Image (cartoon, rainbow, N blue to C red):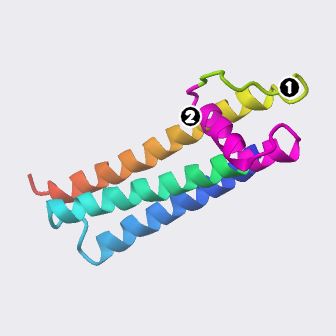
């Protein structure tokens, strides 16, 4: 699962890089505040979609392990783990309990990747906008 979520997140990073390169190539990056906000918004959107997909896949794993009967409960538990919120209101059986911390570490790492790529986009936009100052 960790490798799969890394692959999914890699696609989001690639999409963000391609978006930024395209917007820079056509001259929209740094051209206006509204355009820059749009670029940052889309970069965040790619990351958010990747996180939601990854949380959903972890939920499916929990169901396949027999831990949850309903997808909604599995999804909630997955989101709590992945986001490192850790309410602890739902605890998995001892057999599968270690999946929780693994998912939390996975989520924390991927949130870091998302933060880094969005920060890189913002840095790029600032560099373009203020290159002559």
Res. 85 image quadrant = top right
- For the image, the number of numbered tags is 2
Residue 44 shown left or right of residue 95 in the figure: left
Q: Is residue 12 above or below residue 96?
A: below
Q: Residue most toward the left?
A: 133
Residue 26 shown left or right of residue 116 in the figure: left
Q: Which label was assigned to residue 45?
A: none
Residue holding disc 1: 93
Residue range highlighted in magenta: 58-85
Q: Is residue 14 above or below residue 116?
A: below
Residue 108 appears in the picture as rendered = yes
Res. 24 image quadrant = bottom left
Q: Is residue 70 magenta?
A: yes
Q: What secondary structure is the magenta-colored segment mainly?
A: helix
Q: Position of residue 122 (x, y in %)?
A: 30, 50
Q: Residue at x 67, y 46 (%)?
A: 72
Q: Which label was assigned to residue 83?
A: 2
Residue 106 appears in the picture as rendered = no
Q: Residue at x 62, y 55 (%)?
A: 53
Q: Residue at x 73, y 52 (%)?
A: 4
Q: Residues within 10 Å of mark 2 (few under 14, many from 20)?
A: some
């Amino acid at each position: 699962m960790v490798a799969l979520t890394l692959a999914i997140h890699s696609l989001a990073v690639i999409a963000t890089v391609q978006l930024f390169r395209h917007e820079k190539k056509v001259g929209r990056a740094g051209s206006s505040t509204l355009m820059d906000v749009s670029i940052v918004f889309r970069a965040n959107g790619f990351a958010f979609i990747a996180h939601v997909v990854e949380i959903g896949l972890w939920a499916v794993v929990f169901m396949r392990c027999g831990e949850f009967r309903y997808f909604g409960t599995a999804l909630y538990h997955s989101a709590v783990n992945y986001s490192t919120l850790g309410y602890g209101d739902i605890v998995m059986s001892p057999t599968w309990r270690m999946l929780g911390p693994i998912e939390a570490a996975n989520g924390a790492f991927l949130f870091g990747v998302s933060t880094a790529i969005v920060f890189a986009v913002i840095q790029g936009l600032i560099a373009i906008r203020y290159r002559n100052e």
